[in-house]
Image: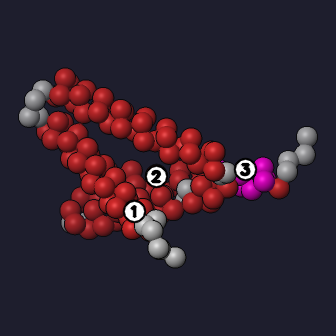
Amino acid sequence: MRLSNRQKKHVAAWGVMLSAGIAVSLLIVQVATHGSALLTPGGTFAVLFLLSGIAFLTTVPWWRALDEMQKSAQLTAWYWGGSLGLMFGVMCTVVIGGPGSDLVKGGMMVMSATVVMFIVFLLGWRVLHRRGAP
């Protein structure tokens, strides 16, 4: 069976995303595990932020290879699945760690960051898609 050009583009995008994503993820684990011995907390955060940005950028070729229906499915799954998964995860931290534990504080920090980034991206989308925008 021959692959169409679109299918080849999709396979190539997956390959780039997976290989770069795995490499960057391994670096993130190393920095998160051993960063405090080598860097200040601010330096560790900066390196993790940079590596996370690179990991995020590895998904761009894959995203561009998707058609509109596939993009809509991804957005729906991430919104509903991510939102419900986040809420379930925070509830689990309360059950496992107990109210007020460090585990719950970490879960709430993740939840807060998620909500803030949702708002930032929603506002950005609204600015870019307002009436009269080029």
In percent of the image, x 20 and y 42: which residue is there?
Answer: 108
Identify the colour scheme used. secondary structure
Which mark is nearer the camera, 1 or 3?
A: 1
Instruction: Identify the main secondary structure in magenta.
Output: helix
Q: What element carries label 1?
A: helix
Image coordinates of residue 86 in percent, x first then y, are 32, 36
Question: Residue 30: which quarter of the image?
Answer: bottom left
Marks 1 and 2 in Cβ contact (< 8 Å):
no
Marks 3 and 2 in Cβ contact (< 8 Å):
no
Q: How far apart are marks 3 and 2 (CA)?
A: 21 Å
In percent of the image, x 11 and y 34: which residue is there?
Answer: 101
For residue 99, above or below residue 127: above
Image coordinates of residue 43 in percent, x first then y, are 26, 68
Q: Which of marks 1 and 2 is nearer the N terminus?
A: 2
| Badge 3 amino acid | Val
Image coordinates of residue 39 in percent, x first then y, are 25, 66
Which mark is nearer the camera, 3 or 2?
A: 3
Q: Residue 25 carries which label?
A: 2
* Residue where numbered disc 3 is placed: 11
Magenta-colored stretch includes residue 21: no
Image coordinates of residue 20 in percent, x first then y, are 56, 57
* Residue where numbered disc 1 is placed: 126
For residue 122, above or below residue 82: below
Q: Which of marks 3 and 2 is nearer the N terminus?
A: 3
Q: What stretch is highlighted in magenta?
A: 6-14
| Badge 1 amino acid | Arg
| Badge 2 amino acid | Ser
